Amino acid sequence: MTQPDSERSAPAGMSEDPRIQDFLTYLAAERDASPYTQRNYRQALLEFQHWRTHDFLGQLDWSKLERDDFRAFLRTLGRGKLGRAAIQLRFSALRSFYKFLIQRGHVAVSPVKNLTLPKREKRLPQYLTAEQMVALLDAPLAPLSAPVPAKRSAGRPVTASICHRDVAILETIYSCGLRISELCGLTVADLDWQEGLVRVRGKGRKERLVPIGEPALAAIRTYWSLLEVVPTGNEPVFLSTKRQPAPLLPRILQSRLKKHLATAHLDPRLTPHKLRHSYATHLLDAGADLRSVQELLGHANLVTTQVYTHLTTERLRRAYNDAHPRA
């Protein structure tokens, strides 16, 4: 999920509504929602709280709000020129929040239910070609072969363990098609070296087994050989530092990926999720069936996976138009 625009977020010093606090506790403790969902839903609800109390100069009572109130909020968002995806995110938070309030008996019905929202743009996922992926997988080791500069640049030098960690991370994401939260949450106990499988904890506490290729396993072994203490048991597979068994933070992974994309002469704006798109697209290109890809990605609905068939169809159409004499 994308983060609500910072300029539209509620003021930092604003006190949270107790119901919002209860909802966020429920998301974390009972729904096991990802940190991104918790953060984005919190900002979306605080933004609505701020809009309602600021514009109407009154106490917010969720049980007395009606559909017209949310239509007015929707118009406000539209005047702010927010994208459709950003608007959808805000109302997704509101819908989930009202479901929670109904479950707890605080309200009888949801005024957000069946509210007509602008449809999201149909954009095909971005992905890297197989050749681009190879270039990206090679990029983390570039600093190790670069000549040592006469004068050290500012900042901490990149160590061999960090370089090989990043190789192992990219290999694992591409080998298993993981979300960034799934990768950062991997523990040593999740790896089945003998069977070549990884236990992945996806959205909504759902677990799935995903094959992992030998190049990814070899990259993890090489990375671990450079650590002072090899992680075991429920310790993270990928560590933030060489010495402490703390899991890698998503923002660090994103920052490192930007560097490697630049080194590989690729678009540094590409996100870790684009590697997941590449994984799915390359599987389908090679003849994998859609149901298998759905299970590998951990998609609840086949419709979510079907977007990748459009990518392969578009590629075939371009090949046809370029090659057929009567296209």
Image (spheres, rainbow, N blue to C red):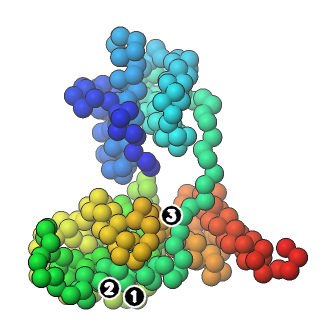
Point out which mark residue 219 bears.
2
Q: Secondary structure at mark 3?
A: loop
Residues at marks 1 and 2 touching, judged by CB atoms closer than 8 Å: yes
Point out which mark residue 298 bears.
3
Q: Secondary structure at mark 2?
A: helix
The first of marks 3 and 1 along the sequence is 1
Amino acid type of the residue that numbered disc 2 sits on in the rendered structure: Ala
Amino acid type of the residue that numbered disc 1 sits on in the rendered structure: Pro
For the image shown, how many numbered marks are present on the structure? 3
Q: Relative to the observer, which residue lies in front, 146 or 258?
A: 146
Q: Is residue 292 above or below residue 82?
A: below
From this viewpoint, is residue 295 visible?
no
Amino acid type of the residue that numbered disc 3 sits on in the rendered structure: Gly
Q: Circle 2: is it few (<14), some (14-19), or many (20+) Cα within 10 Å? A: many
Instruction: Measure the alpha-carbon separation of dots 1 and 2.
Output: 6 Å
Residues at marks 3 and 1 touching, judged by CB atoms closer than 8 Å: no
Residues at marks 2 and 3 touching, judged by CB atoms closer than 8 Å: no
Question: Residue 217 appears at what percent x and percent y?
Answer: 35, 85
Q: Quadrant of the C terminus?
A: bottom right
